[in-house]
Amino acid sequence: MASVPFDLTGKTVYVAGHRGMVGGALVRRLASEGVTILTAARGEVDLRDQAAVNAWFAKTKPQVVFHAAAKVGGIVANNTLRAEFIYENLVIATNVIQAAHHNGAQKLMFLGSSCVYPKMAAQPLREDSLLTGPLEITNEPYAIAKIAGMKMAEAYRAQYGSDFINVMPTNLYGPGDNYHPDYSHVVAALIRRFHEAKETHAPSVAVWGTGTPRREFLYVDDMADACVHLMKTYSSDRLVNIGTGEDITIAEFARVVAETVGYKGKIEYDTSKPDGTPRKLLDVGRLSKLGWRATTSLKDGIKLAYQAFLKERP
C-alpha cells in the first residue's frame, strides 16, 4: 500500500468522466500538478463495457485514477430513470475499479455522493452514519450503486492492499453543469429558470417544493482542489466528506440566484413537487483536520456559475 504523502508529479493520471462537471473541474485543477492527464470519451471507451475498459487500461496503464464518471441528475431524473441509474452506475464502478486494480494503478479515488446517507440521519452528516438507516426513496437506486462502488474500493483495499480511497462531495455547482429543464440539479435548474424568466419578463418563477429543505452547496473547482489535496495527503479506508460545513434553505438560495441573475419578479413554491431530504449538511471535521477548507463563497460561486451558464447554455 502506498504511503502518504503521495507525489503526483510525473504521474499518468486518468480522470474518468472528464466531460462531466466534476471531471472537468478535476482536469482543470490537475493542469498545474505536473502530471500527464488521460481522458477517454465514450466513443473511445464505453465505461459500461467491461472488455473495452479492460483493454483501455491495459493499453494506457494509468498510475492514478480519479473515478468521477457517473450517470447523474436531480430528483426527477433519479426517480424516473431508476433502472438506468442503478445499472449504469454499478457497472461503471465495477469496471473501472477492477481494471485499475488489475493493471496496477498506484492510487484510486472513488467519488461518492451525499445522497448515500440515510434520509433521517443526524445532522450534520458524519461519515460513520453510512448504512445506519433507510435511504431517500427518490434517489435510492443511485445511492445504492454509489455505496456499492465505495464498498468495492474498501474491499480491494482490505484484500489486496490497494491504495483506493473514498470521498463524499456535497451538492456541487459550477462550469459544465447540466441545465436540462427536467433532469438537472437544483442549482442549474434555478439558474436556467430565473434567466429565462428575466428574458421573457415572466411575473413569477416556481421553485419546486416548499422551499424549507436545507442544502449545502460547494463550487465544483473547490471540490476538485479538495480531491487533489486528499489524493496527495490521505490514505485510509475511512471515507472523507467534502463540503463547506454551511447550509442554506432552498428559499434563501433561490433569492441568491434570482439576485445574481437579475430577476425582479416573484418567487413562488410548487408544493405539489417533492422536497427530497429535509436537510443535507455534511460534517467536514475530518476534512478540516486534514488541512483543507473551501474558499469560494456562495455568492461568488453563483456569479461564476451564471457566467458559465451564459457561455454553455443549450
Image (cartoon, rainbow, N blue to C red):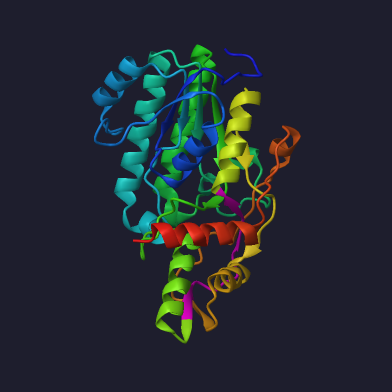
Residue 15 sits above or below residue 253 on the image: above
Residue beneath the point at 50% across and 23% down: 35
Secondary structure mostly taken by the magenta-highlighted segment of the chain: strand
Q: Residue at x 66, y 19 (%)?
A: 5
Residue 46: quarter of image:
top left
Please give the name of the residue rendered at 72% of the width and 32% of the height, measured from the top-left corner.
Answer: 290
Measured as percent of width and height from the top left, residue 174 is found at 51, 53
- Residue 212 lies in the magenta-colored region: yes
Q: Is residue 236 visible?
A: no
Q: Is residue 175 magenta?
A: no
- Residue at the far bottom in the pictured view: 203
Boundaries of the magenta span? 205-219
Placement of the N terminus among the 4 image quadrants: top right
The quadrant of the rendering that contains the C terminus is bottom left
Relative depth, front residue between 125 and 176 = 176
Residue 240 seen in the figure: yes
**Residue found at x 40% / y 38%:** 18
**Where in the figure is residue 156, as x and y percent of width and height?**
48, 19
